[in-house]
Image: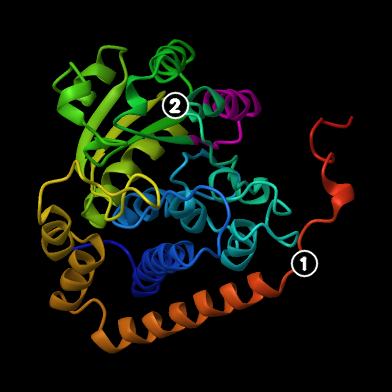
Amino acid sequence: MTNLTKSELLDVYRKMRTIREFEDRLHLDFSRGNIPGFVHLYAGEEAVAVGVMQHLNDEDRIASTHRGHGHCIAKGVDVIGMMKEIYGRYDGVCHGKGGSMHIADLSKGMMGANGILGAGAPLICGAALAAKYRGNGAVGVTFCGDGAANQGTVLESLNLAAIWKLPVIFVLENNGYAESTGRDYATAAESFVERAKSFGIHSVEVDGNDFFAVHKAVGELIERARRGEGPAFIECKTNRFYGHFEGDAQTYRAKGEIDELRANHDCLQLFVSRVVCEDLLTSEELEAIDQEVKDLIERSVVEAKEAPLPAVEELLTDVYVNY
């Protein structure tokens, strides 16, 4: 059983479904040549983002990755503003200058997606240090993949967070691949959790396809951090349904691998199966949300296509900080 209310469960499903529909639509529109730049899709990993973000508020900060759309949506960033941003429009959340990999919204505690692997870890240590200094009970959460976990910046940040006892949670989204490189080929340590423990950090592993498992485990870690008990690390074993980037032929994956993942390890299907079987939600309620989300995504695309592009005089604004 779960301690989440019916309203909270509906909210969870709406966020997970919104992420999936958002990413599926980007996959389609990118293939049509409608979207500029590089795109990395989060579909398949929704349970991690929503499981984490359900515990956070706007005062809590997150640092994302190049695969950050799911983190943004789960943290409450405006979906239509995100679509406009990805389409490069001035009405986007970053005025069309961030695109897919650099969406940020400080009003929601979203410090930004980042195209540099592992770069979110030191940034979130700064945010967590500020929260500790202010004594406001806020926490910082940073995400990285199994490939980025080998970056020196991540390891240095684990050490720093432990030394300063920062209220920060390191979330490792292990989807098995660093671009096209398998986890076992590129990582000597058998366990990311044991590696994190070597820094003296409380660390756990969880099934990243199980929203309820992620939600419970992360909730305990966040409450621990809010009490001043220092940093924590969680490895969420999950899957991505698309390539590393849009256009990735995925020749490194076994034949039928993605079909098997979608059929048996889809976090949305697992969520639906549980809440319906346990009479927590009805199929009709979930189908109503499906339609609402489809309408929202369609509206976001229509508005994005109609929104104005940034003016030429905007080219050099936002380059330097103005005091």
Which segment did they paint magenta? 125-140
Depth check: give the residue in front, 64 or 275.
Answer: 64
Q: Is residue 179 left or right of residue 105?
A: left
Neighbour class for label 1 at 10 Å: few (<14), some, many (≥20)? some
Residue 308: image quadrant is bottom right
In the rendered view, tell whether residue 301 sits above or below residue 311: below
Q: Magenta region, mostly helix, strand or loop?
A: helix
Depth check: give the residue in front, 110 or 19.
Answer: 19
Total marks in image: 2
- Percent across and percent down for residue 248 are 33, 48
Q: How far apart are marks 2 and 1 (CA)?
A: 33 Å
Q: Residue at x 50, y 58 (%)?
A: 73
Q: Is residue 176 magenta?
A: no
Q: Name the residue under label 1.
A: 308
Q: Name the residue under label 2.
A: 118
In the rendered view, tell whether residue 81 sits above or below residue 187: below
For the N terminus, the quadrant is: bottom left
For the C terminus, the quadrant is: top right
Depth check: give the residue in front, 143 or 67.
Answer: 67
Question: Does label 2 or label 1 sit earlier along the sequence?
Answer: 2
Type of amino acid under label 1: Pro
Helix, strand or loop under label 1: loop
Q: Is residue 250 visible?
A: yes
Q: Does the magenta stretch include residue 131?
A: yes
Residue 135: image quadrant is top right
Instruction: Between label 2 and label 1, give the one nearer the viewer.
Output: 1
Q: Residue at x 55, y 60 (%)?
A: 35
- Percent across and percent down for residue 271 are 23, 66
Q: Residue at x 47, y 67 (%)?
A: 32
| Coloration mode | rainbow
Neighbour class for label 2 at 10 Å: few (<14), some, many (≥20)? many
